[in-house]
Amino acid sequence: MIDYYFKAHHASSDSNLKFRNPKYLSILNHLRFYLPEIFPRLNKVVFLDDDLVVQKGISGLWSIDLKGNVNGAVETCGENFHRFDKYLNLSNPLIASNFDPRACGWAYGMTILI
């Protein structure tokens, strides 16, 4: 993956610099989703990115009812920004049958996991 994103012949053809950033390539970037398995005795995990600015108390996050969902996060859709059709390979029939292309992704910076 690193060769694909950082070789000179690919760098000029890939206009989306976000996905060439090493932090998106690191497996540790996805570790947050395994926190409930790493800490099985916790009923809920609130994950905050290191660049997040907290302006008031966050204790209310503990009382949020996730209505059976295992992940709660801040939705980030505006126009076409962060919609699944921008991230997923919907030409794959298995993926296309299980995801709504117009559904919104979420901001990873504030995630509640149970």
Image (spheres, rainbow, N blue to C red):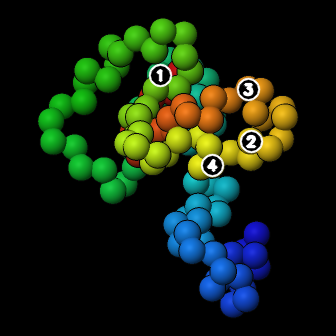
Q: What residue type is labelled 2?
A: Leu
Crowding at label 1, few (<14), some or many (≥20) Cα neighbours within 10 Å?
some
| Number of the front mark, 3 or 2 | 2
* Mark positioned earlier in the residue sequence (3 or 2): 2
Q: How far apart are marks 1 and 4 (CA)?
A: 28 Å
Circles 2 and 1, Cβ within 8 Å, touching? The answer is no
Task: Give whichever of discs 1 and 4 has the lower sequence position.
Answer: 1
- At x 58%, y 61%, the residue is 24
Residue 99 visible, this orientation: yes
Q: Residue furthest right?
A: 93
Q: Mark 2 points at which residue?
A: 90
Dot label at residue 35:
none
Alpha carbon separation for disc pair 2 and 1:
32 Å
Residue 81 sits above or below residue 100 on the image: below
Which residue is denoted by mark 4 in the rendering? 87
Q: Is mark 1 on a helix, strand or loop?
A: loop
Q: Distance between the residues labelled 2 and 4?
A: 9 Å
- Marks 3/1: CA distance? 27 Å
